[in-house]
């Protein structure tokens, strides 16, 4: 049984952590700092409010309509960014085309008076309007007129006449072209233009220039996304439901080994952090909808659904904690010490210290895994609007996701999952494999390709988390998980800058220290009179 962590246990890992810290600095931090200093990694971004003002002023000038409202979100071309990453063309594209055809913009949704709407795309660094699509009333132009209007407009945008000579009008009345000479490897520039006759003048209502990745790349990525969707749906979501049902059954069967009073505090913390985390990313969901006029209604439904979904999820966490506690105690292990038990405060304090060492080691191992996968299976990454820090409602709250994930994933997949399969398989390593697989499958839809990248990475990381959990208990595993995620998110906040983000990054990174200190302090007062408890007989193995 794990009753405590030895005072000098940290000495077993300190040198490994120091070596891993050096590896992590070399593999991840140094290249990032180099990219920032060289200008390749741009961190200076205009405020969303400025993008909204720029878009509104442009639309009013372009169409002569009063803007009723403006809402900016970070929009990203996931497909093109992935292609540039895979082909190592990010710097070349930035130098040649980013100023006019950025793959990342602020998409500003506008509502006009008395009616009409539109989308204006603003460069995130310069603040220039680079594209737009205005859904406003007007008289369509004849084919010859729209061809002339498009040609005149594009020449004013810097295109030469011979570059756009292949343009043609499609059945929907829009003019389309692939300007000659605008390409980067196999990706080519596509331009969509539409015009309307409004208030006795021709107005360009749509101008959408964008580089399009080659069809074979697009087909491959779509196939990988489909595979990831199936893996997540079957391997993660379905198995999470199965584990939830099993947790209810085993919580009842092993109730004599535990108490239904346990887990309430952790469940409440999860519920609060989960709701904050999901309501904070609604702009990302809005961005993923693209140019959807009914986005407001969809976002409202999503917000309501998120709050209601948090209730059964919190229930699943709570019952997993109860069932896991009962299973482990029945197997002769106490992996979740309780407040007030003799030595609990010291256990939590030492657990926190070990967790920082483990997090450093995990960062280095993760960095090495990604490098190996890059050289072996050609792993590359891309962007995702739903995960963009610029789509956080309150950016400095972004690290709360670290605690929601730490509590939920350690409770379900480690505490209950390993405990369940250990009872079935009678072997701890074998018991760790399936819940680790289910957990890893829940991350395959992250923007890494091939889609098996994160599966491979997280099988390794997950087994290491399993070792930490089995050897040092649930609290150590949760602390390690929270620190690991908090630092990863904190680095993003530090690169973005601004005082609230920097303070948040530091606060959430060191948060386990005051938490562990307070637990140690208050627990020591109660431990002065340790209670005498009896433990039920272990079930026969």
Image: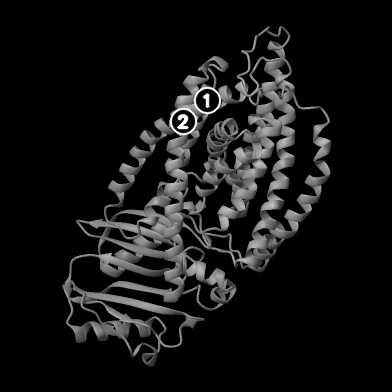
Image quarter in which the N terminus is found: top right
Q: Position of residue 10 (x, y in %)?
A: 80, 35
Q: Nearer the viewer, residue 496 or 231?
A: 231
Q: Is 269 rendered above or below residue 387?
A: above
Residue on which disc 2 sits: 246
Q: Residues within 10 Å of mark 1 (few under 14, many from 20)?
A: many
Question: Residue at image x 36%, y 34%?
Answer: 308
Image quarter in which the C terminus is found: top right
Question: Residue at image x 41%, y 55%?
Answer: 73
| Residue at far front of view | 541
Position of 42 compared to 214: left or right?
A: right
Q: Nearer the viewer, residue 30 or 218?
A: 218
Q: Which mark is residue 323?
A: 1
Contact? badges 2 and 1 (CB < 8 Å): yes
Evaluate whether residue 506 shows in this view.
no
Q: Position of residue 125 (x, y in %)?
A: 51, 64
Q: Residues within 10 Å of mark 2 (few under 14, many from 20)?
A: some
Q: Which mark is residue 45?
A: none
Q: Separation of disc 2 and disc 1 at Cα?
A: 9 Å
Q: Position of residue 106 (x, y in %)?
A: 43, 60
């Amino acid at each position: 049984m794990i009753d405590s962590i030895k005072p000098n246990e940290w000495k077993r890992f300190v040198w490994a952590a120091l070596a891993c810290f050096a590896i992590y600095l070399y593999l991840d931090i140094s290249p990032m700092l180099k990219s920032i200093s060289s200008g390749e990694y741009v961190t200076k971004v205009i405020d969303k409010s400025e993008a909204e003002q720029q878009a509104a002023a442009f639309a009013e000038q372009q169409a002569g309509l009063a803007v009723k409202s403006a809402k900016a979100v970070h929009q990203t071309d996931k497909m093109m960014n992935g292609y540039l990453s895979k082909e190592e063309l990010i710097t070349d594209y930035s130098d040649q085309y980013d100023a006019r055809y950025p793959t990342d913009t602020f998409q500003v949704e506008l509502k006009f008076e008395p009616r009409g709407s539109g989308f204006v795309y603003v460069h995130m660094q310069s603040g220039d309007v680079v594209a737009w699509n205005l859904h406003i009333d007007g008289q369509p132009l004849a084919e010859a007129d729209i061809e002339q209007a498009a040609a005149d407009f594009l020449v004013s945008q810097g295109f030469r006449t011979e570059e756009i000579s292949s343009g043609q009008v499609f059945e929907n009345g829009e003019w389309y072209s692939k300007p000659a000479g605008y390409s980067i490897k196999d990706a080519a520039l596509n331009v969509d233009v539409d015009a309307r006759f409004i208030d006795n003048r021709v107005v360009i209502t749509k101008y959408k220039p964008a580089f399009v990745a080659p069809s074979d790349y697009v087909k491959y990525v779509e196939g990988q996304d489909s595979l990831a969707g199936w893996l997540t749906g079957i391997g993660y979501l379905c198995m999470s439901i199965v584990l939830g049902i099993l947790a209810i059954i085993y919580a009842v069967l092993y109730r004599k080994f535990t108490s239904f009073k346990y887990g309430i505090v952790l469940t409440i913390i999860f519920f609060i952090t989960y709701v904050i985390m999901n309501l904070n990313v609604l702009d990302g969901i809005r961005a993923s909808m693209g140019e959807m006029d009914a986005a407001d209604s969809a976002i409202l439904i999503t917000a309501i659904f998120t709050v209601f979904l948090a209730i059964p999820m919190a229930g699943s966490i709570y019952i997993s904690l109860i069932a896991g506690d009962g299973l482990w105690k029945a197997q002769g292990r106490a992996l979740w010490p309780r407040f007030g038990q003799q030595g609990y405060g010291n256990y939590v304090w030492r657990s926190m210290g070990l967790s920082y060492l483990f997090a450093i080691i995990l960062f280095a191992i993760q960095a090495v895994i990604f490098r190996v996968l890059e050289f072996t299976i050609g792993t590359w990454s891309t962007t995702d609007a739903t995960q963009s820090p610029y789509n956080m409602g309150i950016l400095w709250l972004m690290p709360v996701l670290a605690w929601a994930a730490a509590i939920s994933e350690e409770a379900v997949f480690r505490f209950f999952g390993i405990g369940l399969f250990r009872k079935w398989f009678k072997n701890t390593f074998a018991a760790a494999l399936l819940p680790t697989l289910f957990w890893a499958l829940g991350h395959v839809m992250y923007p890494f390709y091939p889609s098996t990248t994160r599966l491979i990475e997280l099988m390794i990381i997950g087994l290491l988390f399993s070792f930490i959990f089995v050897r040092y208990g649930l609290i150590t595993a949760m602390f390690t998980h929270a620190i690991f995620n908090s630092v990863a998110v904190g680095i993003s906040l530090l690169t973005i800058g601004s005082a609230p983000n920097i303070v948040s990054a530091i606060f959430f990174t060191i948060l386990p220290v005051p938490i562990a200190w307070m637990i140690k302090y208050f627990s020591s007062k109660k431990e002065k009179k340790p209670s005498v408890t009896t433990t039920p007989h272990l079930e026969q193995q």
